[in-house]
Amino acid sequence: VQLQASGGGLVQAGGSLRLSCAASGRTFSSYGMGWFRQAPGKDREFVAAISKSGGSTYYADSVSGRFTISRNSAKNTVYLQMNSLKPEDTAVYYCAAERALPSHIATMQAERYRYWGQGTLVTVSS
């Protein structure tokens, strides 16, 4: 599967953005999907994940209550709605896909994901 992330940009603190990740192929529903981010000088970190069916979602504590992950199987797209953005949310955001994510813990581990998009930059100004 190939992934194409979009929707990043510059926004003021308190603002909102919606990221999209379009997947190629006919087996989108076979993949669990995740969003990760990497700020300058920092390691890549988990942001959110959604199960194959969309019935389960997981969030990092730092974004819980502000970000919402969702998926649209008809459009082969996963979204990350980001509200109440903070300067510390500034990072390159990556979407990722994997067929085999056997546990909640696995969904939060970048090394578990085989397929990655190219990243989209989100900059939040104070």
Image (spheres, rainbow, N blue to C red):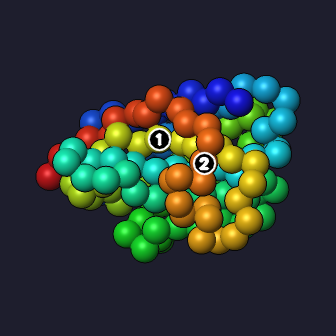
Q: Amino acid at mark 1?
A: Tyr
Label 1 Cα crowd, 10 Å radius (few <14 / some 14-19 / many 20+): many
**Residue plotted at (81% across, 56% down):** 53
Which one is in front, 29 or 97?
97
Task: Left or right? Give the position of 64 relative to 69.
Answer: left
Q: Nearer the viewer, mark 2 or mark 1?
A: 2
Residue pointed to by mark 2: 113
Could you tell me if residue 84 is visible in this image? Answer: yes
| Place of residue 86 in the rendered image (x, y in percent of width and height, measured from the top left) | 26, 58
Q: Is residue 62 above or below residue 30?
A: below
Q: Quadrant of residue 102?
A: bottom right
Pick whichever, 73 or 93, lies toward us.
Answer: 93
Q: How many marks?
A: 2
Relative image position of residue 108 (x, y in whole percent): 54, 63
Residue at the location (31% across, 53% down)? 43
Picture disc at residue 9: none
> Which residue is depicted at the point 84% across and 36% down?
27
Q: Residues within 10 Å of mark 2 (few under 14, many from 20)?
A: many
Residue 2 on image: x %, y %: 65, 27
Residue carrying label 1: 94
Q: 24 and 114: which one is in front?
A: 114
> Which residue does the image show at 69% across and 70% down from the upper left?
103
CA gap between label 2 and label 1 equals 11 Å
